[in-house]
Amino acid sequence: MLEITNLHTSYGKTPILRDVDVRVDEGEIVGIMGKNGVGKTTLVKAVIGLLEADEGTIRFDGDEVTDDPADSRARRGIGYIPQGRDVFPELTVEENLRMGETINESNGDLQYEAVYDYFPVLEERREQDAGTMSGGQQQMLAIGRALIGNPDLLLLDEPSEGVQPSIVQDVTRDLERVNEELGTTILFVEQNLHVVQNLAERCYAIDKGTIVDELGSDRLESREAVTEYLAV
Amino acid sequence: MAGIELLNFGFEFVEVFAFIVLATVGLAVIFGMMGIINLAHGEFILVGAYATTFAFAAGLPLPLAMLTGVVITAVFGLVLERFIIRHLYGRLLDSMVVTWGISLVMIQLVRIAFGNSAPGVGIPFGQLPVVDGPVYYLVLATIAVGVLGGLYALFAWTDFGVRARATMQDEETARSMGVDTDRMYMATFGIGSGLAGFAGALYAPVMTITPEYGTGFLVEAFVAVVVGGSSVIVGTILASGFLGSVNAAFTNLAGTFMGQVAMLVAAIVAIRLMPDGITGLLADWRENRGESR
């Protein structure tokens, strides 16, 4: 589904990612964990196409997309949920969801009712401006917005950031449900121990811009193995 | 007598309101949606007027000549956006200097190419029976209301409108949702340009067309955009209504010159009291109301 090979990325002249190799198979939930400032967000932005690769390749669904702009990658089927949600604050909840319809041109869109089934609060607040909702509700909206387009790959940048712990558990459960029921492949970056252990089937560890380890489900169960790469 | 005065005031208001709305909407779309202060706005209006008057002189019926004016101005705007304006997004001062330069160059080019005046277009529809003024001003007012309604429908109800507003709020996120934001900016600039051309075309029958034609619209357009605030449609309606009322009242009492002076004084007071415009004040009021609940 997604194959990142020898990826190098930089901000101006400052290199951030070096020689990154990541592979995500269809239907998997894969995490990328690491502390603050190690290149997690940079990696996600490079995958969706908001940052250019200096070197290396990104292949999605068998096609090379390394030089494609972000809008083209979204239309191919990558749904992106940015860090801090980045909902459109002055659009209503329903208008925000409508924005997701552009994602994945080849699949039909999900029915709004299906998204409301995952996140009932969105239906209750469909006419409300998104900027007036709580952090947790905005996170649900950001996920719902990406889901409307029925993406093949859901890309999440720290879904737990700025969200209260009880809501984080709900969001984690919802993402598992999406993966099971819709078959959506999920790649997320995270530094929250709970989310990494409960959501990921497999996880890469990133440090100083490079992948330093890969943990399977057995090692993910061990708190010590995971916390080694997180600021816990 | 009072009835006639009231009718005169109403007619004056309708005339000024339509003028401010039509002069402003193109500028308001480009500024409100894209953050570009287009100092060449008057010259976009000029393009619309010249294209209309020459198309009319070439034998096209007036509505078709006006449509030609709108299309040529929209295409002109699209070309300008493609080669110059798109490099200026997020650079407010640079965009002002560049569009001012474009304005100066265009005025001189028009003077060189067409001389100091263009062929006239007669005012259609004749005179009103009771009030001293042409029927055409009522047509302009109807069109102004139609333009506002059309813009509201476009930006509030269509996919294009939702995507355009999303792009203006957060371009990066809109792009990552699959929106071709470059095309969105281009289309929005084209719409703003076309609306400016529409103003030029509509006023071609009632104003003398010279290379400085566009400057006759600039004061009202910029004052209305600033007084209206960031919301394109609501800001334009409220500012046009407010400024139009002041202008019409003082024009009736003391003549056209005093009407203009009173409108500008009212604008200065409004900007002093509402730095973010009328819609900024309304937004603050709504926010405070929400917090106090």
Image: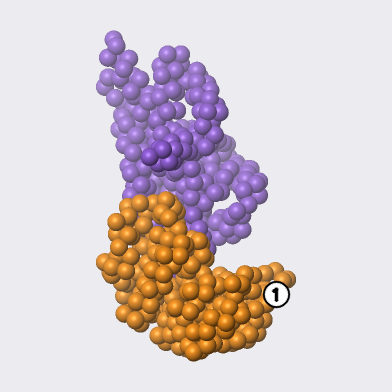
Q: Chain of mark 1?
A: A
Q: Is residue B146 above or below residue A152?
A: above
User: Quadrant of the image for the C terminus of chain A?
Assistant: bottom right
Chain A image colour: orange
Tell me the kind of residue under disc 1: Pro
Could you tell me which residue is drawn at 29 percent across and 59 percent down?
A: A123
Could you tell me which residue is drawn at 27 percent across and 14 percent down?
A: B3
Residue at the far top: name it: B1
Q: Is residue A208 above or below residue B209?
A: below
Label total for image? 1
Judged left or right of residue A140, residue A208 is right
Q: A141 or B9, which lies in front?
A: A141
Work out whether residue A36 can be spotted.
yes
Work out whether residue B22 can be spotted.
no
Residue at the far right: name it: A13
Quarter of image, res B13: top left
Chain B image colour: purple
Image spot of residue B141 (x, y percent): 34, 34
Q: Is residue B283 above or below residue A149?
A: above
Judged left or right of residue B128, residue B183 is right
Q: B57 or B159, which lies in front?
A: B159
Q: Which residue is mark 1?
A: A15
Image spot of residue B102 (x, y percent): 62, 47
| Callout 1 crowding tier (Cα within 10 Å): few <14, some 14–19, many ≥20 | few
Quarter of image, res A109: bottom left
Could you tell me which residue is drawn at 57 percent across and 84 percent down?
A: A225
Image spot of residue B107 (x, y percent): 60, 42
Q: B269 or A84, which lies in front?
A: A84
Could you tell me which residue is drawn at 26 percent across and 66 percent down?
A: A113
Q: Secondary structure at mark 1?
A: strand
Q: B37 or A81, which lies in front?
A: A81
Image spot of residue B209 (x, y percent): 50, 36
